[in-house]
Image (tube, rainbow, N blue to C red):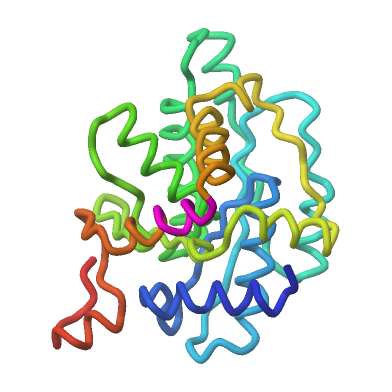
Amino acid sequence: MKLQRLFSLTRQAIDEYQMIEDGDHIAVGLSGGKDSLTLLYALHGLMRFYPKRFTITAITVDLGFEDFDLTPVKMLCERLSVPYTIISTDIGKILFDIRKESNPCALCAKLRKGTFNQAAKELGCNKIAYAHHKDDLIETMLLSLIYEGRFYAFSPYTYLDRTDLTVIRPLIYVSESEVISFKNKYQLPVCKNPCPVDGHTKREYVKKLTNRIEDENNGSKDRMFRAILNGKIDGWPLKISETDSLGGEKNE
């Protein structure tokens, strides 16, 4: 995927769900993985020509695992002139050494998000950007169907009243295959995930299941994606076209 297509898909999502307003200071969550680095490139590029002026700050929540070298990510941020903050934590030690969690993902996510949100507030950000892409959206929907018995997927735009922060997901129109193509084309400095359970989660199972369904039923991912967009899921904002037709304002 070329940079121009990344900009186009990202801007489409931002425009349709009114994710960015003038003066926004957006905290970009950097895990060191391909998705978050792609998001960094997308928002950094859009800053130069998007009609609404905004700034970005990159933040990594370091879980405290050994041999997790973020130097390449730091160098990329320096090259792009993006402020970068690393928050050191003992989350990994708490999960695996102290609590010895057998299913640590939910608690890990809660602790990471809390730490990230606090850092974003301290750095003066009013919005936070996550790098969830199109495949993440589909997989979340299937996870909810299979394990919770409900039709649900995370929203592209969510206001968090407890923290007065807004979550945006600008990559929801970008597929994982496009992210991989972008990573390879632009040689992104991806850092290997040091988590001991990486690749052994329910999400990984659903990822493989989704790919198998696509292999056996060509176009199924796109159809599932459209079902989510048209599913009137609780908490989802209206697209700007839908808002205009109703004569209303954005649903937060």
At 83% from the left and 63% from the top, the residue drawn is 185
Q: Is residue 252 above or below residue 12?
A: above
Q: Predominant secondary structure in magenta?
A: helix
Q: Position of residue 129 (x, y in %)?
A: 50, 60
Which quarter of the figure has residue 65?
A: top right
Q: Quadrant of residue 165?
A: bottom left
Q: Which residues are magenta?
A: 218-224
Left or right side of 46 for 122: left
| Magenta-span inclusion, residue 219 | yes
- Residue nearer the viewer, 184 or 109: 184
Q: Nearer the viewer, residue 5 or 42?
A: 5
Instruction: Confirm whether the magenta stretch covers residue 167.
Output: no
Left-right relation of 34 to 184: left
Above-or-below relation of 159 to 64: below
Identity of the residue drawn at 19% across and 54% down: 234
**Closer-to-camera residue (48/1):** 1
